[in-house]
Image: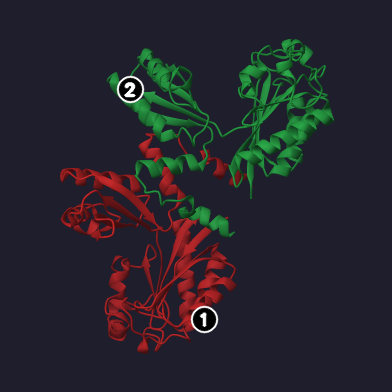
Chain colours: A green, B red
Amino acid sequence: MAIIECIPNLSEGRRQDVIDACAQAIRGAGVHLLDVKSDASHNRTVYTFAGDAPAVRAAVLALFAAAVPAIDLRSHSGEHPRLGAVDVTPFVPIEGVTMAECVALAKSVGEEIGRQFGVPVFLYEEAASTPARRNLEDIRRGEFEGLAAKMQQPDWKPDFGPSAPHASAGAAVVGARMPLIAYNINLATNRLDVAKKIASAVRQSSGGLRFVKAMGVELSDKGVVQVSMNLTNFEKTPMFRVFELVKREAARYGVNVLESEIVGLVPAAALTATAAWFLQMEDGFSAEQILENRLRGKA
Amino acid sequence: MAIIECIPNLSEGRRQDVIDACAQAIRGAGVHLLDVKSDASHNRTVYTFAGDAPAVRAAVLALFAAAVPAIDLRSHSGEHPRLGAVDVTPFVPIEGVTMAECVALAKSVGEEIGRQFGVPVFLYEEAASTPARRNLEDIRRGEFEGLAAKMQQPDWKPDFGPSAPHASAGAAVVGARMPLIAYNINLATNRLDVAKKIASAVRQSSGGLRFVKAMGVELSDKGVVQVSMNLTNFEKTPMFRVFELVKREAARYGVNVLESEIVGLVPAAALTATAAWFLQMEDGFSAEQILENRLRGKA
């Protein structure tokens, strides 16, 4: 079965009845709701669910049907930047489904959101219609308050829906992306400058690896420092290469790697590729050799 | 769902009608028949199938019902040592099932084989009733031809069934064991003595790691040598430790590891543990963090 993960971000993190009603709408569409995380100071809730394409599509539309009448951006405040009631909706290919299929799903769901709810939709990341719209930060710059003016610029016509913001629900950003891995490496030192220099060396924004975001932080309870990272495409910038590069950079300062950690979830393929690389497995190795995959293929 | 793998070895590798009838008997019990491998010179066929405990039990009994009337050890010859028609039947815990449950299954199936088919049963490996019966080689020593005399010794009373061999079907060896990983490491040299020395250093029989069987062989088509291994308990003697030890021993002879390979299937947990070790993942990492596991837990 194809499995697509979807992680919509709702601009509501305080009113529990709205948060619950949206969760109920998602569940009712027949997907597996894996996680709900609300943050009151951000005034934002992140839902994580998974299913096949028809179920995921139904769940997103049910979420919009619940959220659009319930959330008014004109009276919304919170620390996190946002454009709309259902602010961002990424589709992520997990198993038996390609990125191209997730892009097609983003476009089809985006079109329906514009039509059914009168909310303008911007496609982002892999689904973006122009390179200028790949980055969420660029689309969201100016936030809800600046959206009406922004949308008057010819560059910021939406991909779907009306050419002006929805009065209360703003706009929606919909797209497709690879699974993100939150990956941290702790260093056997308390020198924050070393963690910051390493973060700067390995992240794309300052010249490092293409799909790495990184910063150096202090773990005061452990008395050590950490290179805290997001890996945004584990196929093109794999975990083992990031680990080995951080280790090599640390050695240049006479510092060892203490340990590393994955925060939250990781796709099995990211770990399998790591094992195969360190064991120098020849190209002949395939995921078909993993016993559980073989059993499931036959089931 | 609990998944148990079962890999019965049949003493017939030449008569295709018998091989097919046994495969049909297994399939008819509702398990997934994953692989059938016959060897004419060994005169032996290895079936690999998987399912939950009731289905696996039914499949083994169906296999005995098909094999016992069809195979006569008195006229059987082949290179591979054997005691009986269905020679060896191991149960292997794969997912959602403990070794203790596989041991219990081996005992229950063994008892039924004795009762239903009049075939004496010896329990082996994790299911063995005494340490002297853990190793298959010890039970099988003397083969079918020496079995009647062997069973007259007080040490070789069977665990179930009659106290003498079945006239045509001999005896059966039934047990429970960990999954076996066939793992080879190729060295960047053609010096067979180096591969043999390393095999001797890492295998249990000559003082090496507890759950490693190893030999040094020549890969004449590639012009290199190989340390060819069976890892019989990947939890207690993990792949990464075997790889690193072989690499270290090779370095002592100025030889590099060229590549490694898994032949056939490998449990996902063996690869996950390898990734976690090389990435120095802290103890906090758990299989629950693998996205696919989380999805399946909810399914």
Give the labeled residue for mark 1.
Answer: B65
Instruction: Answer yes or no: are tags 2 and 1 on the same subunit.
Output: no
User: Given contact means CB atoms under 8 Å apart, are the residues at marks 2 and 1 in contact?
Assistant: no
Please tell me whether residue B144 is drawn above or below residue B220 in the rendered image: below
Pointer 2 indicates a residue of which chain? A
Task: Compare residues A161 and B119 and report the one nearer the observer.
Answer: A161
A18 relative to B178 in the view: left or right: right
Q: In this rendering, is residue B126 above or below B96?
A: below
Find residue A203 and report its horizontal and vertical position in percent. 45, 22
- Residue A178 shows in this picture: yes
Q: Disc number at residue A118?
A: none
**Residue B33 sits above or below residue A198 on the image:** below
Label 2 belongs to which residue? Answer: A250
Q: Nearer the viewer, mark 2 or mark 1?
A: 2
Quadrant of image for the C terminus of chain A: bottom right
What's the residue at 32%, 26% (across, down)? Answer: A248
Secondary structure state at the residue bearing disc 2: helix
Q: Position of residue B50 (x, y in %)?
A: 52, 63
Left/right of residue A73 with respect to residue A3 in the rendered view: right
Q: Quadrant of residue A41?
A: top right
Q: CA distance from mark 2 to mark 1?
A: 64 Å
Q: Amino acid at mark 1?
A: Ala
Q: Residue at (57%, 34%) from the top-left corner?
A: A178
Q: Position of residue A82 (x, y in %)?
A: 68, 17
Depicted A260 relative to depicted A298: above or below: above
Q: Position of residue B276 (x, y in %)?
A: 40, 38
Q: Secondary structure at mark 1?
A: helix
Q: Residues within 10 Å of mark 1 (few under 14, many from 20)?
A: some
Residue sitting at 48 percent across and 87 percent down? B69
